[in-house]
Image: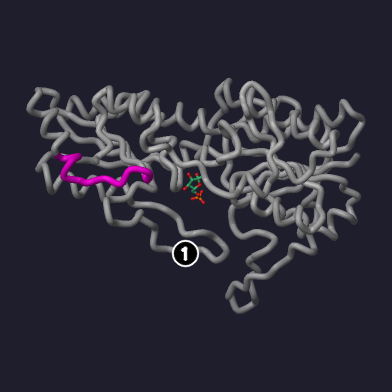
């Protein structure tokens, strides 16, 4: 067998561990592995497909980012091509992907990505490409798997950051609002806010009423706890309102979320009269070394992907179904996103600890 691997969408801690695991597990079977650089872009660029071996992937398990590069702009089905006049045209290059793979003698593609990349993988599978998907995203919003790799490292980074905000909040008697990533799912905000003892956690799954958040802050002041930590998922939205988006648009890219924390911060300052500061943790959540949990998970996902290819389980995602890995058809895997259950155990536990969800 000659297999290819690519990494698509936003980078996440653990990508390199998956790449290494795939290469070692494939070599162990006497197979060849190539890496496609920057998602699928490498297929269209000279030198964009590289041979991978044990030596090249040596010592990368602990490294953040991806040695293959990635792209979350466009897809082979909607590929942005810049014209001479500076305009951008969106073209379908998916047939070229299938042709290039066959020219390169590739029997199977291991596509490591989040929901966008796995949708592309599913469409390519329907064009006859043999694909095995691996679930990556710090957002943890893939329904098919118990957890995605990268999520727990992002939660650790966000937890450390919130821990550090406590001292300034308390010393200055301030309300500190921190916006965390997660797209339209509140997993990072919920886990980090819970673990770092936030006072309020606002997530997309539970639209908030700012007046309720202000009540919680006032109650803390009255109780002599004159500071507050408010964790806001970037996709959080007020009751009857919409999520906050950045104004600028990029051709071939989905609308980008942004401004949720600032909106909450401004509103709270007006309602409570208390000094309120906001910050956006941003891409720090995607960077750095994967924590041990994510390394182990990534290595398991990578080796399982090769095992699935060996067993002919194509058109599937390697999903964690504890304690095992399970093959989930890609079509089912991307059918719907995994939202935080608004009445689930974690939310109930947080409420029991006195954390407000602004509802
Ligand atoms: O999906 C991962 C993620 O980091 C989201 O949490 C976030 O909304 C998005 O990617 C940001 O993407 P970009 O790096 O293109 O701004």
The residue identified by callout 1 is 249
Q: Nearer the viewer, residue 234 or 13?
A: 234
What x and y, as percent, mark residue 90? 63, 70
| Residue at 55% over, 23% down | 291
Q: Tell which residue pokes out farthest to the bottom in this image.
A: 85
Q: Quadrant of the N terminus?
A: top right
What x and y, as percent, mark residue 55? 81, 29
What x and y, as percent, mark residue 138? 52, 37
| Residue at 80% over, 30% down | 307
What x and y, as percent, mark residue 73? 59, 57
**For this view, does 117 lie left or right of residue 272?**
right
Instruction: Note whether 216 is above or below 300 in the view shown.
Output: below
| Residue at 26% over, 29% down | 355
Q: Quadrant of the C terminus?
A: top left
Give the secondary structure at mark 1: loop
Q: How is the image coloured?
A: one colour
Circle 1: is it few (<14), some (14-19), or many (20+) Cα within 10 Å?
few
* Magenta region: 204-214
Instruction: Note whether 54 is above or below 211 in the view shown.
Output: above
**For this view, does 224 lie left or right of residue 260?**
left
């Amino acid at each position: 067998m000659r297999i290819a691997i690519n990494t698509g969408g936003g980078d996440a801690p653990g990508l390199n561990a998956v790449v290494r695991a795939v290469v070692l597990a494939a070599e162990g079977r006497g197979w060849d592995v190539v890496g496609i650089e920057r998602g699928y872009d490498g297929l269209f660029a000279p030198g964009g497909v590289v041979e991978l071996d044990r030596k090249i992937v040596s010592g990368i398990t602990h490294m953040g980012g991806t040695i293959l590069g990635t792209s979350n702009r466009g897809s082979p089905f909607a590929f942005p091509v810049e014209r001479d006049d500076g305009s951008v045209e969106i073209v379908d290059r998916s047939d070229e992907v299938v042709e290039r793979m066959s020219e390169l003698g590739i029997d199977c593609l291991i596509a490591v990505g989040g929901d966008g990349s796995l949708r592309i993988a599913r469409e390519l599978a329907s064009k006859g490409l043999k694909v095995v998907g691996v679930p990556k995203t710090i957002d943890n919003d893939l329904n098919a798997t118990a957890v995605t790799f990268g999520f727990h490292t992002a939660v650790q980074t966000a937890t450390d950051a919130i821990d550090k905000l406590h001292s300034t909040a308390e010393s200055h008697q301030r309300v500190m609002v921190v916006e965390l990533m997660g797209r339209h799912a509140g997993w990072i905000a919920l886990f980090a806010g819970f673990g770092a003892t936030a006072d309020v956690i606002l997530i997309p799954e539970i639209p908030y009423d700012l007046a309720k958040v202000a009540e919680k802050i006032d109650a803390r002041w009255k109780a002599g706890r004159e500071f507050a930590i408010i964790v806001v998922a970037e996709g959080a939205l007020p009751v009857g309102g919409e999520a906050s988006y950045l104004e600028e648009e990029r051709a071939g890219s989905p609308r980008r979320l942004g401004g949720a924390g600032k909106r909450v911060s401004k509103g709270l300052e007006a309602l409570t009269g208390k000094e309120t500061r906001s910050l956006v943790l941003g891409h720090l959540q995607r960077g750095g070394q994967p924590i041990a949990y994510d390394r182990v998970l990534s290595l398991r996902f990578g080796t399982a992907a090769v095992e699935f290819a060996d067993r002919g389980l194509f058109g599937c995602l390697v999903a964690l179904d504890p304690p095992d890995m399970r093959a989930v058809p890609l079509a089912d895997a991307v059918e719907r996103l995994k939202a935080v259950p608004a009445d689930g155990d974690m939310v109930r536990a947080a409420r029991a600890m006195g954390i407000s969800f602004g509802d």
